[in-house]
Amino acid sequence: MPELPELEILRINLNNRIKGKRIGRPTIINPKAISGDPNLLENKKIEEVMRRGKWILFSLDKLYLSFHLRLNGYIFLLDYGEPDDYDCAILPVDGEYLHFGDPRRLAQMKITEDVDSFIEELGIDPLSSDFTLEYLDRTLKKKRTNIKTFLMDQDIISGIGNTYADEILFSARINPTRLCQSLSRDEVESLYKSIKEILEEALKLGGTSIEEFTNLISGERGFEPKVHRREGEPCEVCETPIVMIKIGGRGTYYCPKCQR
């Protein structure tokens, strides 16, 4: 699943290419993936491409077009308007065609007049100024769950998924099974620092190199996970083999020696 860094890069690329352009008559291939009236999109100007958590948002004139790519969804800008195998919708954009689709048919496209109705339900974006050490500390103290589940809860922090949760916890040297309320103040500070640093590094390097996520990113992705999907490989710090366990049904990777 694409996470915050990959989606932020997608947002930047889309904004650079289609901001200020107008949407033509949409072609809808899979109506089940669409919420709202797609006919409202015709001739609407794309004022800004934004992101909140894992949502990509097009700000239009008195309207919002929102995309959630789920596990394998995609947004491509192509020079042809014929549908591909997994397309859900095609939007003409001043001579190009935005193809939105998903092989698993899980991705969503929403057309709404008021984006706040569902955006307000999301947690704080960890790269925003609203995400403070005090917010993290206060929220952790209220939760009885483990820290891995906490990091992936989109109602608390929006945008972090399985890959970056593993990498953040390794960077902070925190065991993913630890209960939120068991973390000391020093550990909370380390966690906060790791959230910021890991996401910013991944964004700078173009996203993770192992996720099967294709979009408008130009160049190679250079962020190399240190523990995620590296079961059995030696930890780069202590050479203890990385282990994999299941937390909430998701594969969780960590170093049993470094992460306490």
Image (cartoon, rainbow, N blue to C red):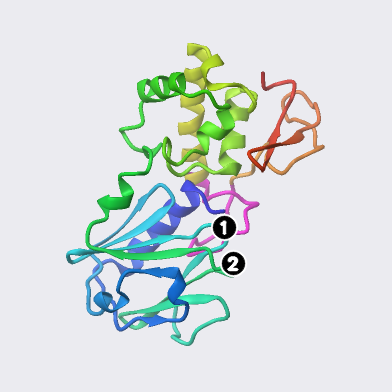
In the rendering, at what x and y percent does residue 191 appear? 51, 24
Identify which residue, 238 or 1, lies in the foreground.
Answer: 1
* Residue 257, above or below 77: above
Residue 58 placement (x, y as % from top left): 30, 62
Quarter occupied by residue 24: bottom left
Q: Earlier in the sequence, mark 2 or mark 1?
A: 1
Mark 2 is surrounded, within 10 Å at the Cα level, by few (under 14), some (14 to 19) or many (20 or more) other residues, namely few
| Residue highlighted by disc 1 | 71
Marks counted in the figure total 2
Q: Magenta span has 34?
A: no
Question: What residue is rendered at 51% in x and 76% in y?
Answer: 87
For the C terminus, the image quarter is top right
* Residues marked 2 and 1 touching at CB (< 8 Å): yes
Residue drawn at x 50%, y 13% as measured from the top left: 186
> Label 1 crowding class (10 Å Cα cut-off): few <14, some 14-19, many 20+?
some
Q: Residue at x 43, y 42 (%)?
A: 158
SS assignment for the magenta stretch, majority? loop
- The residue beneath circle 2 is 104
Tag 1: amino acid:
Leu
Residue 11: x %, y % from top left: 39, 57
Q: Is residue 22 visible?
A: no
Q: For residue 147, which quarter of the picture?
A: top right
SS at circle 2: loop
> Where does the image place residue 138, in percent across and percent down from the top left?
39, 20
Which disc is residue 243 wearing? Answer: none
Query: Which residues are drawn in magenta?
Result: 204-222
Task: For marks 2 and 1, give the CA distance.
Answer: 8 Å
Q: Secondary structure at mark 1?
A: loop
Disc 2 residue type (three-letter): Arg
- Establish if 221 lies above or below 22: above
Is 209 magenta? The answer is yes
Which one is nearer the viewer's eye here, 191 or 201?
A: 191
